[in-house]
Amino acid sequence: MITVTLRQKKTNTGNIYLYLDYHPAVFNPRTFKTIRRESLKIKLYADPKNAREKKYNEIMLEKGEAIRCKRQIELVNEQYGFLDKSTRGEDFLDYFYKASLKKSEKWMATYRHFKEFMKGKCTFGALSIGLCDKFKDYLLTAPIGKHRKKLHQNTASAYFCVLQSILKDAYRSKLLQENLNDYLESIPSKRSYRPFLTIEEVRKLKDTPCKIPVLKAASMFSILTGLRRSDIMTLEWSHISTAPDGGPCIIKTIEKSDRVEVNYISEEALSYCGPRSSGLVFKGLTTSMTYTYLPQWVAEAGIDKHVTFHIFRHTNATLLSSAGIDIYTVSRMLNHKNVGTTQIYADIVDDRKRVAANAIKL
């Protein structure tokens, strides 16, 4: 059994400091190092000159003994967190950044906001419940980003979930001695309306020429498959394969979920990919095209709506629901982790609501 003894050390300058002596030395399972002594950074008067200084020494010795008892109990319980004090000074932002590189853009966006909130500096020791709550208020109220606008509550909710995830990872890796998530409340998300195109508007787009052919092809492909712009821009011919039923499918790592998914697609969707080749399917497609030429094409089609590329994904979900496809299948087609995310599309095209709306006639 390891014994812990409170000892005093007198320096060359005549000062006396308290330290703990461990016998035998204690092994740290995280750093794979041993420790024999632990400085308590408690200073005593070497030669107390009055009652006040004597009383001070008594109080400090009592505190030192209290720490000794606490350490002894922790060793009996095999709790070694106190040995790894070095992690408190380690760079949490660097840890957050490296973790975000392996995750989605949402993680990287949260990292950037947290870095701005902390003014570019944050150690593990600085993390606390109060700090996390202040970051929550920052996400909900502060004008952030290059446009200096307040975040939508659902976006703030998603970003705060990322912070909670990274804190959980740090605790599991023993970089935090306490799981802060036990004391944090998430930001509730609000159910929001998601715009979409009707089947008539989709046909208008299909029949309207676009100045950038690859943009039109990618847009129609998104409407027919529900794939996000990020996944379409990185789609390669090697990702397009043949499913067991003989039809085309896409086997690809989806960027947002970072999971390999199998997406069945129609022959019509495949036709917008053009002749089979190698490399990227939609060569030359850029993000800037969706901001400049997409609105022009939509206006020329006679559609009076603010249409972004992501609306094509909403359109796919809504059209599938209106075609009678069950919500579970729609959820799988969109690679949603939670069926609840898909529910809003089913509610939009719920025929029972129309029947109910027309039930009362005056």
Image: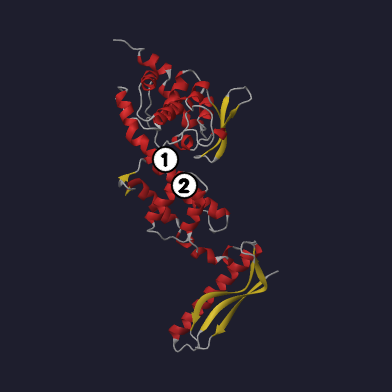
Pointer 1 or 2: first along the chain: 2
Q: Answer few, some or many: residues within 10 Å of disc 1's Cα (few below 14, many 20 plus, some between 14 and 19).
A: few
> In this image, 287 relative to 24: left or right?
left
Residue in the image at 52% along x and 39% along y:
257
Label 2, on which residue? Answer: 107
Vertical relation: 87 (above or below) 171: below
Q: Position of residue 128 (x, y in %)?
A: 45, 57
Label 1, on which residue? Answer: 188
Q: Nearer the viewer, residue 257 or 183?
A: 257
Q: Answer few, some or many: residues within 10 Å of disc 2's Cα (few below 14, many 20 plus, some between 14 and 19).
A: many
Location of the C terminus (image quadrant): top left
Residue 297 placement: quadrant: top left
Residue type (three-letter) at the residue carrying disc 1: Pro
Please tell me how many numbered marks the rendered image carries.
2
Vertical relation: 34 (above or below) 358: below
Can the viewer see residue 25?
A: yes
